[in-house]
Amino acid sequence: MESSEQELIPQNDIPQGDVPQEDLPQDNIPHEDTNALSQLVEKVQDHIHQVIVGQNGMIDQLLAGLLADGHILIEGVPGVAKTLTAKLLAKIISTRFSRIQFTPDLMPSDVLGTSVFNPQTSTFQFKAGPIFSNIVLIDEINRAPAKTQAALFEVMEERQVTVDGLTHKMQSPFMVIATQNPIEHEGTYRLPEAQLDRFLMKITVGYPTLDEEIKILQRHNQQAITELLNTMEAIITPEILSNARMQVRETHIEPKLLEFVAKIVWETRNNRSLYLGASPRASIALLQIAKAYSVLRGRNFVIPEDILQAAPAVLRHRIGLTPEREMEGATTDDVIKEIIAKLEIPR
């Protein structure tokens, strides 16, 4: 039995986008009009860069993940705008947004919700947790124990939550953006492989360049970040996002490129440097992100460079290095490069 939206008791009132729906562009993007979507992406990038300096790679990957309808894991040291960029992405889409701070004492019911007794009707009603939103930012996801992490398995894969035998569907769009710190290990837990596999991409964020850091200081000297955030307006409706995602799904890819995607993933399962290879879910994710990149670049067909660009972010969290390679100082990105270098790139 599925509960209706009216049966949910929201944990708190999550505000909609800053701009009323009637004030937003309602035009649907024609599937064949790749230029229209490309122009919209440029507008989104410009809005984000009003606040964020640099980090072009992270922004492109976030947009690709958004268009491919997947969840994103962002890893980087504190202070490199991981959380800020995720909040900005949510702000420019006219959808609900919630943020969950993961801590060691967080329980599954704190995320999903729980059934509460209503004395007026003498029945139990489901009180929705903060996961019931459209874009959900999970800060420091690796600080919660395995019991809480397991609560995310169903909702990330099937876009639904089952509590007390009742299934509650998530509203579309639904996207989880999680952050974690790769340096600090005290009070953290290793994410289960099954959960990592549910993230479409893992984005690694580095430090800004010297020129970018100077620009960051100049911008902060002129205006506070909170003031900049307040000026951001929603420019994408759920309808526009839905049509953009349909355009990504309909993007053409040659059979030889599909075979190339399969070969890359298959090689991870037969590489001596890896004890864990990528699953078929990785092949599907690599296909989706390659299509999203082609649309971001203003094309309606996939080229090999789209696949090569997508491979590291799609595969790095789905494969496991052997202890020997780890002792040598190798990374999963190094092995991905070695695998691609051995394959013939179709032209």
Image (cartoon, rainbow, N blue to C red):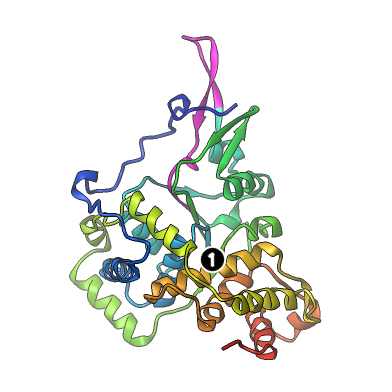
Instruction: Please give left or right for residue 14 compared with residue 291 in the image.
Output: left
Query: Which residues are drawn in magenta?
Result: 115-137
* Magenta span contains residue 233: no
Q: Residue at x 68, y 78 (%)?
A: 264
Q: Residue at x 57, y 62 (%)?
A: 200
How many tags in the picture? Answer: 1
- In the depicted structure, whether residue 109 falls above or below residue 198: above
Between 178 and 245, the one lying in front of the other is 245
Residue 37 image offset from top left, x and y in percent: 33, 66
Instruction: Tell me which corner region of the image, top left, top right, bottom left or bottom right, holds residue 60.
Output: bottom left
Quarter of the image that includes the N terminus: top right
Q: Residue at x 36, y 40 (%)?
A: 14
Q: Amino acid at mark 1?
A: Gln
Residue 182 visible in the picture = no
Residue 273 image offset from top left, x and y in percent: 77, 81
Give SS at disc 1: helix
Residue 255 image offset from top left, x and y in percent: 61, 75
Instruction: Please give left or right for residue 41 compared with residue 313 in the image.
Output: left
Between 251 and 26, the one lying in front of the other is 251
- In the depicted structure, whether residue 283 falls above or below residue 11: below
Quarter of the image that includes the C terminus: bottom right
Q: Residue at x 68, y 49 (%)?
A: 146
- In the depicted structure, whether residue 197 falls above or below residue 287: above
Residue that label 1 marks: 288
Between 123 and 341, the one lying in front of the other is 341
